[in-house]
Amino acid sequence: MEAPVFIEAKSLVKNYKRIQAVKDLSFTVFKGDIFGFLGPNGAGKSTTIRMILSLIRQDEGDINIFGLPLRKNRNRILTGIGALVEEPRLYEYMSAYGNLEMLGRLSGKSISRNRIMEVLSLTGLDERWNSPVKSFSHGMKQRLGIAQAIIHDPELLILDEPANGLDPKGMKDMREIIVRLNREFGKTIFISSHILKDIELMANRMLIIDHGAKVVEGNVQELLNAAESDLKITVSEPDRAVAVLKDKLGLTDLIIDHEGNIVLKANREHVPEINKLLVDNGLKIFSLTPVNSLEKYFLDKT
């Protein structure tokens, strides 16, 4: 049974004078997704996110969230969404606890002390709950931004470049928080990021746009598996192995790299055939690895 649809965008168009920032863009986000939203700089990602959050209005098209038209149900829908767009807005002189308490007051909701401490613990800030935010690192401030986005326990999170400016440890921490929010707490997450490896590790579905238009949408692993990839083979007698592959399969686009590995273009469905051919010709295979990263796929598509 297909999961309920949480975001449905239909034929979105947004123009800025002579520039068409978003062009006939349609996509679907299902409940339970970590949905990666990718595109080069200037592709229309931020404009699309702002339309979903009703910060700006589309010129054409429709957006339904939780099965409801956004234009007619804005307030009702936004209570079920948490968002981190660019850098979080924080009161630097207040503590992490104070920031979340203040946000609760401004939203008109009653947020208990237990809920605030639960969210600070989830984002790894419980030991610094009473420290002024001005003493926080950039990574800690980004985590507090996530805490702000989830304090009211929304069903849907929209995150725009949440790992922007973070060091490798900060990126890892952020990735772990996002995955935990999805798997343990059932949050549906729509995430825009230029860190393609993060999306590859986290997302189950993705959308790539370029110049405001959709390039591809679908299951991350299915898209990568279907794409032509580099195949790296570590084998005894690489020169003879290359001769066999050229003679028996007619392959021409292959090289031996500086480490003595054979590298060639192949779809994953051809890997068993290549493996059997080399073994049948008395060659020892030490490793045979398809290499197709999201980065390569993204660059091929854009």
Image (tube, helix red, strand yellow):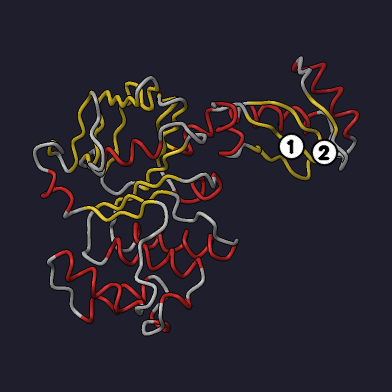
**In the visual, does 31 lie left or right of 86?**
left
Picture coordinates of residue 181, whole percent (x, y): 34, 61
Residue at 25% x, 44% y: name it.
53
Residue at 61% x, 34% y: name it.
296
As helix, strand or loop, the secondary structure at mark 1 comes to: strand
**In the visual, does 78 lie left or right of 174?**
left
- First along the sequence among labels 2 and 1: 1
CA–CA distance in space, label 2 to label 1: 6 Å
Contact check, label 2 and label 1, Cβ < 8 Å? yes
Residue density around tag 2, few if under 14, some if 14–19, many if 20 or more, within 10 Å: some
Residue at image mark 2: 261
Picture coordinates of residue 35, whole percent (x, y): 37, 43
Q: Which amino acid type corresponds to the residue marked 1 in the rendered image?
A: Lys
Residue density around tag 1, few if under 14, some if 14–19, many if 20 or more, within 10 Å: many
Q: Which amino acid type corresponds to the residue marked 2 in the rendered image?
A: Asn
Residue at 56% x, 47% y: name it.
197
Residue at image mark 1: 232
As helix, strand or loop, the secondary structure at mark 2 comes to: loop
